[in-house]
Image: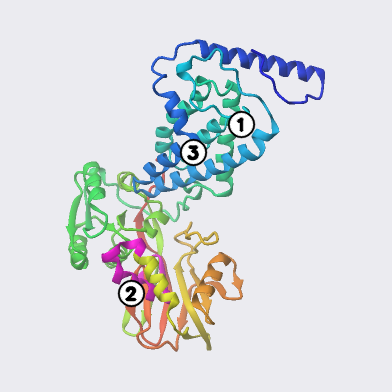
Amino acid sequence: MSPDIDLTAPASGARSALRRLLALDGRLFEFAAERSWPGAEPVLPRLSRSADHGVLWFAAAAAIAASRTPRARRAAARGLASLGLASLTINTLGKRSVRRPRPELDAVPNARRLTRQPVTTSFPSGHAASAAAFATGVALESRAWGAAVAPVAASVAASRVYTGVHFPSDVLAGAALGAGVAFAVRGVVPTRAQLVPPARPRAEVPALPKGRGLVLVVNNEARTADRARALSSVLPEAEIVECAPEDLPAELEKAAGRARVLGVCGGDGTVNTAAAVALRHGLPLAVLPGGTLNHFAHDLGVEDVRDLCRALENGEGVRVDVARFRSGGKQGIFLNTFSLGVYPELVRERELWEGRIGSWPAGVVAALKVLRADRHPLQAEFQGRPHPLWLLFAGNGTYHRMGLAPGRRLDLADGVLDVRVVHGGRGPALRLLSAALAGPLTRSPVHAAVQVHRLRLTGLSPGTLLAYDGEVTEGEDEVRLEKLPEALTVYRPLSDGR
């Protein structure tokens, strides 16, 4: 078989080489068609059809994301992004650049042939490109999930030759293009592994073989049961204490009295409470994420039981900044963010709905109610000047944003408060959206950003709501914020275990 191809070579030598390559490609196709593939007949044609229009990969992404780990969700999202770009590239450039006819099916047994034959040109294989793009994208974010997906992707690519709809070179070219697209996506949007927090300032922390000396207090209202059991199986000598949210402060105080290392499993509010106890007792803190968002743990580089156990057993830790707020007779710390204005109202409204309709729907309902309400901006004085504002956000460390995407910190010991303000004016919804779109820009008509070591606001109305690490309280007429540089010692993996 000598497949035809609509391609103009610049010289006769090149045309001759191309003809030889195409002839070799045809012979390889015939060789594959004539050989028996044990066990392939009931599997590969079905697998090939299931990958039509990316259906197989959307299902795979849903299955990966259902594992409910942040790494898995990122792997699924990156796989789909790579798949989408690969499909767009193939359909707009690949198929139109090289108009190669499909192989003749004479040598392919009827049992292998697809019921509906493709009508597009043959080079390159879109199915192979999509398979390689999805599998490579997943693997770049999670090696474990990449290893699970790779055999399926390879089988889909092989099925295109097996069913007779592509030459081997079509599949190889498609796979190479798909993998290249996945790496291109990584160049634009770096993976989590490329954005590892700096391993400094390192702290001397004890290594805890089998968890000996660790007392882990678990908020049993959070999503903690499976993680606590997993940690107990890996670190059998760790002491695990489960308690209700209202008993958490007392249990943490008792645990600190007998622990070599204080551990906590829960969301950001729970971690905040544990950090305050660890600071008072001078103990290192081990954080196992168990809430909905887990900003502090994830920015620290601890996403699951494996990360924390590796750090505990190897004695790996760092010192991180803590921020403190004072308002009248109230004071507290925050590891992530402090805010006043619209956001604390949104948090309080969300809590009213969360128990009835779930976390994410409650957040949507709360946002709609708060942003549509008839309200006036908050009045505050800063550096002796009055400032109407809809929102003031202060981050414990610099937050990096990309447009509307959630922010994260790469350095938890940079010594600054990342202060963002949305100025007052007509319509909070439009102004908040404009500020979000401005992203990391220092200035915009509705948005300002500054990095400071301390902040003082006066002229607030007593009872103004304040939010810190997801908790809400009422403030007085003055609020002071300050940094406590490198005040807290925490465990985090410093060696690559991915």
Dominant secondary structure, magenta: helix
Residue 351 lies in the magenta-colored region? yes
Residue shown at the point (19%, 53%) measured from the top left: 240
- Residue identifier under label 3: 54
Please determine whether, in this image, residue 405 is positioned above or below residue 109: below
Q: CA distance from mark 3 to mark 2?
A: 44 Å
Q: Earlier in the sequence, mark 3 or mark 1?
A: 3
Please determine whether, in this image, residue 79 is positioned above or below residue 274: above
Q: CA distance from mark 1 to mark 2?
A: 59 Å
Residue 144 lies in the magenta-colored region? no
Residue 70 lies, in percent from the top left, at 39, 50
Q: Which mark is residue 472?
A: 2
Residue 368 lies, in percent from the top left, at 42, 71
Range of residues picked out in magenta: 333-361
Residue 422: in sight, yes or no?
Answer: yes
Mark 3 closeness class: few <14, some 14–19, many ≥20 residues within 10 Å: many
Q: Amino acid at mark 1?
A: Thr
Q: Earlier in the sequence, mark 1 or mark 2?
A: 1
Residue 448 lies, in percent from the top left, at 56, 74
Q: Which residue occupies the foreground of this view, 408 or 347?
A: 347
